[in-house]
Amino acid sequence: MSAAESLVEVRVPDMGNFKDVAVIDVLVKVGESIEPEAPLVTLETEKATMDVPSTAAGVIEKIHVAKGGKVSAGDLVATVRASERGAGAAAGSAQQAPGAAATPSPPPVPAPQQLVEPAPQAQAAAASTPAPAAAPAAAPAAASMPARGELPPINEPGFSRAHAGPSVRKFARELGVDLTRVTGSGFKGRITHEDVKTFVKGALASPGGAAGGGALPAVPAVDFAAFGPVEVQPLSRVQRISGPRLHASWVNIPHVTQFDEADITDLEALRAQLKDAAAAQGIKLTPLAFIVRACVKALQAFATFNASLDPSGANLVLKKYVHVGFAADTPNGLMVPVVRDADRKDVYEIARQLAELSEAARHGKLSGAQMQGGSFTISSLGGIGGTAFTPIINAPEVAILGVSRSAYKPVYRDGTFVPRLMLPLSLSYDHRVIDGAAAARFTTFLAKTLADPRSLVEAVP
Ligand code: CAO
């Protein structure tokens, strides 16, 4: 061994309870020259596959594991005869002080899609769409990158555990991106090139960069098993996709929720009259169909609620179509199918579509297209219960209506209390686009429209 060479031991990263994990592939041979981050072996747990990357450049001196074997955290995988260049490359990127906490920066608001999409093709399409809200005007990433010091330092132990392939790791190293901060949108949460790019765009767009004012304090990790027995349950696929989108909306959009109540006594009387005739035609005329119809009228009267901010954040894109999404509770998790051109459909056609789309959602049969292009969303928990809630905006939409369970309440009218059926409304809106006064006008209009239901059953021109 020359003076410029040293032996580097590459071990299975410490990933907590990481024991007896299967080695499904050995990717290098003794004597092979490798770069830092070159994958050495592939491991498979119940939840994911992951590569163990080399921490140094050099030549493989010895491989200590075999395909089909089992390894645990800390086990020796390979010994690398590292050249000085290789040892330096790995050490040079270790910028984080030991023990420094990783703080996630706000994820960018997703592309104008939907909260979740079931089909793998749809997922791939979403992943390849540039994120609009946080992305600056397209410039070559390298040319517009902040100085390396402006990105948060790389958490080396976390980086080596990140669920990403070698080329993504290399790409992240080149850009100085800490993979522990990047949300993976690939299969089983694997981090893709697009995820790294989206992270960088988000870091560039956030005031003060990823390490500055945009950074969020981390929630400390807790070993729950230290306090009693626990069972670890992986999130469903739908939750893994919708979670980052909900998070992006929550942290990027200043939400305000306006509460109101609509007197739907007459609406329910009318619905009771029409219900059986509709049922004879196979249509379930639920309150939600009337609420969608009333929202269409409100969206036509208040165009800024049927709009999105453009990627620069300086312009409002007013939509000439009205596609209304609705949250559907399914065994797989929350889905948001969209009733397209709701402004061109009467209450019966809307009811028919609500039933068809929620049936498809419950059976995991929605296509990506059936969940795209929404311009406003309704989340109805009325069939379940509750008096009010604060729904999260389905970004890049600018408002969402939450509906809770109607109940009879005493309403003071003409000097006396009368029992009226009151429907609670909770409208969350993007305060960058919508003022409080406009939101109050919108819910007032909506409540009035629901209180006088005749216009809701008129034929649609
Ligand atoms: N107040 C009182 N009763 C209501 C009501 C309300 N606001 N809304 C619906 N109901 C009643 C209906 O009349 C129906 O009763 P009947 O069967 O006696 O007629 C019953 O509740 C069930 O309605 P439904 O669920 O069949 O139909 P829907 O149109 O109200 O809702 C759907 C459809 C898809 C919105 C609903 O099934 C659902 O999934 N809701 C949950 C949405 C959700 O999870 N939102 C949260 C998202 S954020 O995590």
Image (cartoon, helix red, strand yellow):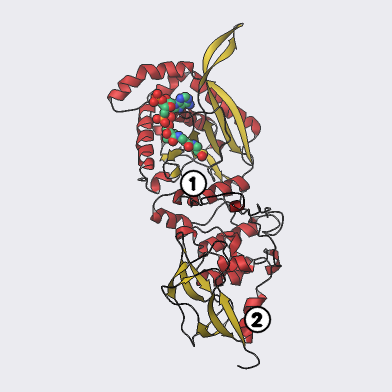
Instruction: Tell me if label 1 and label 2 are in contact, CB under 8 Å.
Output: no
Tell me the quadrant of ligand 1: top left
Three-letter amino acid code at disc 2?
A: Gly
Label 1 Cα neighbours within 10 Å, binned few <14 / some 14-19 / many ≥20: many
Between 53 and 205, the residue placed more toward the observer is 53
Three-letter amino acid code at disc 1?
A: Leu
Picture disc at residue 246: none
Q: Is residue 22 above or below residue 47?
A: below
- Percent position (x, y) of residue 274? 35, 19
- Percent position (x, y) of residue 246? 55, 46
- Percent position (x, y) of residue 271? 40, 20
- Percent position (x, y) of residue 23? 45, 71
Picture disc at residue 115: 1
Horizontal side of residue 149 vs 402, given as left or right: right
Between 286 and 162, the residue placed more toward the observer is 162
Q: Is residue 60 above or below residue 138?
A: below
Query: Mark 2 highlights which residue?
Result: 88
Mark 1 residue CB less than 8 A from any atom of ligand 1? no
Residue at 58 percent across and 56 percent down: it is: 135
